Amino acid sequence: MKADKLKNASDGRVELTGKVIQKKFGIGSKSEHEAIYFETPVGVFQLRRLGGNPFYDQELNKLLGKIITATGIVNDKLFIATTIKTID
């Protein structure tokens, strides 16, 4: 996602609740790797933190298997989180 799109998306933020899971991304391609996903009632999105590393984010790895509520920007099948709260 280009930075200019992020600047214009502030009014397009959404809040979703779901489970953080891990599965393969880009199967069979040079980009194949284990990625973090956000499984929600409205769909499954690759999960990233705004400013986080897209290939390995230690903070997101700590959330694997947990239910979270996240606020962020949705772009197709990508959810860029600006805030993340775990649900106990």
Image: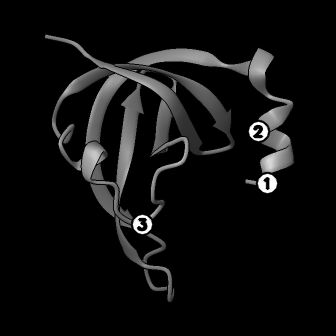
Nearer to us in this view, 80 or 23: 80
CA gap between label 3 and label 1 equals 17 Å
Residue found at the very far bottom of the displayed protein = 30
N-terminal of the pair, mark 3 or mark 1, is: 1
For the image, the number of numbered tags is 3
The residue under the point 28% across, 37% down is 20
Residue type at mark 3 is Phe
Residue 17 lies, with reference to residue 27, above or below; the image says above
Q: Is residue 54 left or right of residue 72?
A: left
Q: Residues within 10 Å of mark 3 (few under 14, many from 20)?
A: few
- Which residue position is annotated with label 2? 6
Q: Quadrant of the C terminus?
A: top left
Point out residue 54 in the picture as x, y percentages from the top left corner.
Answer: 48, 60
Q: Residues within 10 Å of mark 1 (few under 14, many from 20)?
A: few
Point out residue 57 in the picture as x, y percentages from the top left corner.
Answer: 34, 55
Q: Quadrant of residue 24?
A: bottom left
The residue under the point 41% across, 26% down is 40
The residue under the point 38% across, 45% down is 37
Point out residue 80 in the picture as x, y percentages from the top left corner.
Answer: 56, 38
Mark on residue 55?
A: 3
Residue type at mark 1 is Lys
Marks 2 and 1 in Cβ contact (< 8 Å)? yes
Residue 43 lies, with reference to residue 17, above or below; the image says below
* Disc 2 element: helix
The residue under the point 86% across, 46% down is 4
Q: Quadrant of residue 53?
A: bottom left
Point out residue 63 in the picture as x, y percentages from the top left corner.
Answer: 21, 37
N-terminal of the pair, mark 2 or mark 3, is: 2
* Disc 1 element: loop
CA gap between label 2 and label 3 equals 19 Å
CA gap between label 2 and label 1 equals 7 Å
- Which residue position is annotated with label 1? 2
